[in-house]
Image (cartoon, helix red, strand yellow):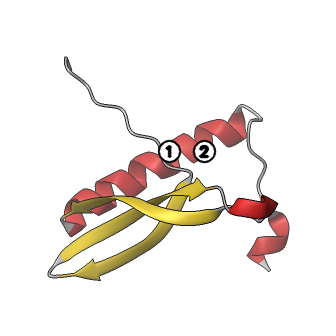
Amino acid sequence: MENKQELFADGLGQIHFAGGMVRFDFVTLQPEQNGQAPVPQANLRVIMPPQGFLAAFNSMQQLIDKLVDAGVLQKNEAAKK
């Protein structure tokens, strides 16, 4: 992959399904005046077909499992109740 473009997002603002496609709206945190808490501002939308979404979800789940095994993340047992 030459000429790769990198983008940064603080998080995911919204995921929704419209027009047969899954849409991810990513946000960055923009500082406010007077020291108030930063406000999320949408800066990028990624759109993919449902089968692409499922493949991405499976890849993310595999990475989460590896991070748990490596001790980088911990399972939240309270969330399962």
Residue farthest left in this picture: 19
Of 20 and 27, which appears nearest the observer? 27
Q: Residue 62 carries which label?
A: 1
**Residue type at the position of mark 1:** Gln
User: Which of the 4 quarters of the picture holds residue 33?
Assistant: bottom right
Find the distance from the CA under tag 2 to the CA under tag 1.
5 Å
| Mark 2 Cα-neighbour bin, 10 Å: few <14, some 14–19, many ≥20 | some
Residue farthest right in this picture: 78
Of 44 and 47, which appears nearest the observer? 44
User: Residue beneath label 2, please?
Assistant: 65
Q: Helix, strand, or loop for circle 1?
A: helix
> Looking at the image, do the residues carrying marks 2 and 1 touch, with CB atoms under 8 Å apart?
yes
4 lies left or right of 61: left
Of 70 and 14, which appears nearest the observer? 14
Residue farthest front in this picture: 34
Q: Helix, strand, or loop for circle 2?
A: helix
| Mark 1 Cα-neighbour bin, 10 Å: few <14, some 14–19, many ≥20 | few
At x 53%, y 41%, the residue is: 63
At x 21%, y 61%, the residue is: 48
At x 51%, y 51%, the residue is: 61
68 lies left or right of 74: left
**Residue type at the position of mark 2:** Asp
